[in-house]
Amino acid sequence: QVQLVESGGGLVQPGGSLRLSCAASGRIFSINVMGWYRQAPGKERESVAVTSGGTTNYADFVKGRFTISRDNAKNTVSLQMNNLKPEDTAVYYCNVRGTTYSYQNFSSWGQGTQVTVSS
């Protein structure tokens, strides 16, 4: 099994910054995709930023404000969020997809971390 542990959420004023981190552990042979998603109350979960190989895709609503980064040696992925807006308020989830040492594909989700942007 692969476990993900998230950290870094909280309450921030509009225009502020937060950094989310996610660490993957377990019998990981390789990781192909790492990403961040979010879900606001009453809405469906949506993609925020996803990185795979040398390609990174951002949702239009975060372009220029959020930056995703990964550390392949540590199996971690982070999301630096700048110029936060009230509409960024949501539970943020990390997702990691790859292959275990048993050569099984996996897709694991973090427990979610609350980000609240409010004055």
Image (cartoon, rainbow, N blue to C red):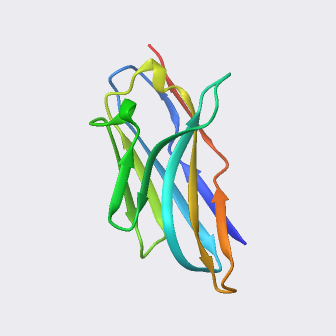
Which residue appears at 41% of the width and 47% of the height? 79
- Image quadrant in which the N terminus is located: bottom right
Q: Residue at x 54, y 62 (%)?
A: 23
In the rendered structure, the answer to whether residue 28 lies left or right of residue 61 reads right
Q: Quadrant of the C terminus?
A: top left
The residue positioned farthest toward the bottom in the image shown: 102
Residue drawn at 54 percent across, 49 percent down: 7
Of 7 and 92, the residue lying toward us? 92
**Quarter holding residue 44:** top right
Residue at horizontal 35 percent and vertical 54 percent from the top: 56
Give the residue at the far left of this rendering. Answer: 64
- Is residue 1 placed above or below 80 in the rendered structure? below
91 to 37, vertically: above or below: above
* Residue 104 locus on image (x, y percent): 69, 79
State the count of labels.
0
Residue 34, horizontal then vertical, whole percent:
49, 59
Q: Quadrant of residue 5?
A: bottom right
90 on left or right of 61: right
Residue 108 image point, x, y percent: 65, 60
Q: Residue furthest top?
A: 119
Q: Nearer the viewer, residue 39 or 5?
A: 39
**Residue 83: image location, x then y, percent:** 31, 28
